[in-house]
Amino acid sequence: MRINILAGGPTEFWPDDIFEQEGQWLGADRGAWYLMQAGMDFQTVVGDFDSLTKEEFEAVISHLEANHVYRFPPEKDFTDTQLAIKAAASLGADEIRVYGATGGRLDHLLANLTFPAMEGFTELAQEIDLPDLVERVALVDKQNVVSYLLPGQKVVKHIDGMKYLGFMPLGLVDNLKIIDAKYTLTQPESKAIMWSSNEFINELVHLSFDSGIMIVTQSKDGGK
């Protein structure tokens, strides 16, 4: 089951076809208000909702059954988007697409990009019997798709319309090999450095690494 999460990031970063995506929708904080305003069908919302006015929050509440609203205090360990990813996984999603998670505040962006490192995520994946859950999550905006890889022999498929390919270890990654991209790479030990502006030669790029988590970006220039 695919669940799409709409977070509260700036609307100008949304893909043009955002509301044409298949799957169920989940609202994260102000993303719930955006979904309601767009007339989208959604059943669950998560967040502290500090970005909504009292009237907006009451409108969201009246739109949903109360037991589908998961409200947290502003003083919490996780961002609203991180909580929404955990909620989507707990609801049985085996594919999660996150929209509205880029643009705006840089601290939110970095927290969203590094969510697999948050405490409890690995345990949650094991609890729902999806140890590869991190590989089923992608952050999507108008110019970028961010995905994640666990150790092993991996294949990255080119996304139509994207030109650039990037790789960044989330923490330490051992024995990284980027095999058949435009720019190959062999690194016995890689730290959190972005290997950016690579490109596909064919539709697939093969890579491997022995430990850690790899962030993969596919991007295009603006206005294209």
Image (cartoon, rainbow, N blue to C red):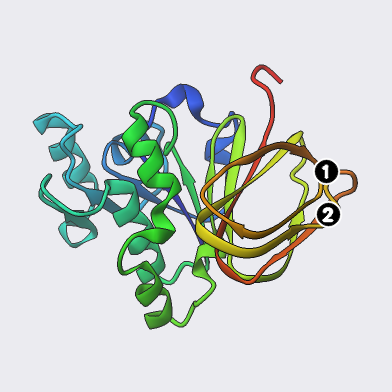
Q: Residue at x 33, y 28 (%)?
A: 105
Q: Quadrant of residue 104?
A: top left
Q: Are marks 2 and 1 in contact (CB under 8 Å)?
A: yes
189 on left or right of 67: right
- Estimate the x, y position of residue 7 in percent, counting from the top left: 37, 40
Residue type (three-letter) at the residue carrying disc 2: Leu
In the rendered image, the quadrant that contains the C terminus is: top right
Vertical placement of residue 221 versus 215, above or below? above
Q: Residue at x 16, y 57 (%)?
A: 66
Q: Nearer the viewer, residue 141 or 200?
A: 200
Q: Nearer the viewer, residue 70 or 117?
A: 117
How far is disc 2 from disc 1 in space, using C-alphas? 7 Å
> Is residue 36 visible to the viewer in this orientation of the structure?
no
58 on left or right of 45: left
Disc on res. 200 = 1
The residue carrying pointer 2 sits among few (fewer than 14), some (14 to 19) or many (20 or more) residues within 10 Å by Cα, namely some
Vertical placement of residue 37 versus 176, above or below? above
Vertical placement of residue 89 versus 97, above or below? below
